[in-house]
Image (spheres, rainbow, N blue to C red):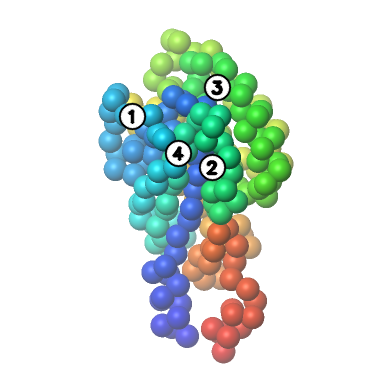
Amino acid sequence: MKKNMEKKKKNNNVNLITLGEGQVGKTSIIYRYIDNSFTMTYLATIGIDSKYKKIKLDSGEEIKVKILDTAGQERFQSIAANYIKKADGIIFVYDITKAFTFTNLEKWLSNLDEIASDKPCLLIGNKSDMDDQRQVSKEEGMDFTKKFKKETHFYETSCKTGENVEKAINDLVNQIYSKSMGNDPAKGGLQLENGKKGDEKNKKKNCC
C-alpha cells in the first residue's frame, strides 16, 4: 500500500491551458511562472506549446504543473478545443491596455460552456505595470468572474515585474487539488487523469 501511494505522488500532475486573444501575454505569463524570466521579444505562438514546473502545494504535496500555451488566432481555436477537454484547469488572459481583448472573452467563455463548463478557471488581467495605458478597470475584471458558472479567481498580473503571476497560477492549482480530493487534502495524493479521479474500483484495490 505504501509503495502504491509513493508511486502516485511521483506521478502527480496538473494540466492547465491558457486561452485569450493573441498578444495578451499568455506566453510571457508561462515563462515568468516556469523559470521566472521575461523578454520583450517572444515570437507569436503557433498552435500549441507546453512547459513544465514542479511545485509544492499548500498541503505539502509535490506535483508537476504542465501549462499549454495556445495561439489566440481564430484559426487555432479548434485545435485548442481538443486540449481544453483534457485540461484540469483553464487560464483566461486579457490585456488591461486593450479593451477588445477583454470584451472578446465572452466568445472564449461561450465556447467553454459547450465543452468544459465544469473545469476550474482563473481570470488574469495582464500588463498591470502599464496602468497609465489602462482601458479595462480592475472592477470590470472582477465583475466578469460572475459570468463563470463556478468560483473563479481573478488577478491582475505583470510579466515584466512578476507581480501576482506565481500566486495566481498556484491558487488555481491548489483549487484543482482541493476539488480532486473532495476539499479534504488528508485523503491522500493528487489523483488526476485528464481532470478526473481514478475510478472507485481501482481505489479499493489499492487500499486493501
Label 3 – label 1 distance at C-alpha: 19 Å
Front of the two marks 3 and 1: 1
Label 2 – label 4 distance at C-alpha: 7 Å
Label 4 – label 1 distance at C-alpha: 12 Å
* Dot 2 crowding, Cα within 10 Å, few <14, some 14–19, many 20+: some
Q: Secondary structure at mark 4?
A: loop
Picture layout, residue 177 above or below residue 40 = below
Q: Secondary structure at mark 3?
A: helix
Residue 57: x and y in percent read 44, 56
Check disc 4 and give the amino acid type. Answer: Gly
Check disc 3 and give the amino acid type. Answer: Thr
Q: Mark 3 vs mark 2: which is more N-terminal?
A: 2
- At horizontal 32% and vertical 29% (from top left) the residue drawn is 42
Quadrant (top left, top right, bottom left, bottom right) of the C terminus? bottom right
Check disc 1 and give the amino acid type. Answer: Leu
Picture layout, residue 112 above or below residue 199 = above
Question: Does residue 137 show up?
Answer: no
* Residue 89 disc label: none
Q: Mark 3 vs mark 1: which is more N-terminal?
A: 1
- Give residue 49's quadrant in the image: top left
Q: Mark 4 vs mark 3: which is more N-terminal?
A: 4
> Between 190 and 95, which is closer to the camera in this rendering?
95
Front of the two marks 3 and 2: 2
What residue does disc 3 label? 101
Label 2 – label 1 distance at C-alpha: 19 Å
Q: Secondary structure at mark 1?
A: loop
User: Cβ–Cβ below 8 Å for labels 2 and 1?
Assistant: no
